[in-house]
């Protein structure tokens, strides 16, 4: 059975949605992701604009304005919920890792 789209988010997806908690255009998103991650994660224009289109189609973000070729976006409630769910999933993974290491150290 195929996995539901956006059931888990890749790092670029996560950071794009995180940026869109406030209104941003594509160029701002690329720069913010780079800054947030200290350059560890970069999002190129092809990946970014493809994901933005998919997020719009999934109603996770919406377009707020268009100025020439510059488009700005903002997170919807659905997008905010999905971002929060991904955060909780990542926290659970970290807790599992920490618990496993403690159990291993006690053995």
Image: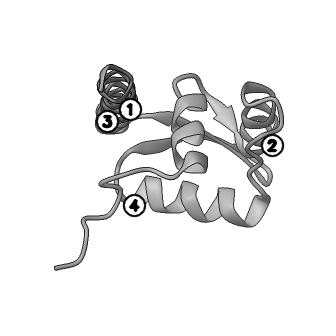
Image quadrant of residue 98?
A: top left
Residue 89 - label: 3
Task: Give 6 or 59, whichever is nearer the viewer.
Answer: 6
Across and down, in percent, residue 13 comes to 53, 48
Picture layout, residue 29 above or below residue 55: above
Q: Give the colour scheme shown.
A: one colour
- Secondary structure found at label 1: helix
Circle 1/circle 4 CB separation < 8 Å: no
- Of pointers 2 and 4, the one earlier in the residue sequence: 2
Which mark is in front, 2 or 3?
3
What secondary structure is marked by label 3? helix
Label 1 or label 4, whichever lies nearer to me, is 1
Residue 6 picture quarter: bottom left
The tag earlier along the polypeptide, 1 or 3, is: 3
Q: Residues within 10 Å of mark 4 (few under 14, many from 20)?
A: few
How far is mark 4 from mark 3, CA to CA? 24 Å
The residue identified by callout 4 is 57
x and y, in percent, of residue 5 in the image: 32, 64
Residue 45: which quarter of the image?
Answer: bottom right
Q: Secondary structure at mark 2?
A: helix
């Amino acid at each position: 059975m195929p996995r539901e789209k956006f059931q888990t988010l890749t790092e670029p997806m996560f950071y794009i949605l995180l940026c869109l908690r406030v209104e941003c255009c594509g160029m701002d998103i690329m720069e913010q992701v780079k800054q947030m991650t200290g350059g560890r994660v970069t999002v190129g224009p092809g990946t970014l604009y493809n994901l933005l289109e998919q997020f719009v189609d999934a109603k996770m973000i919406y377009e707020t304005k268009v100025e020439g070729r510059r488009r700005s976006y903002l997170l919807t409630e659905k997008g905010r919920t999905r971002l929060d769910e991904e955060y909780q999933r990542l926290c659970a993974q970290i807790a599992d890792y920490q618990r496993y290491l403690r159990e291993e150290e006690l053995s």
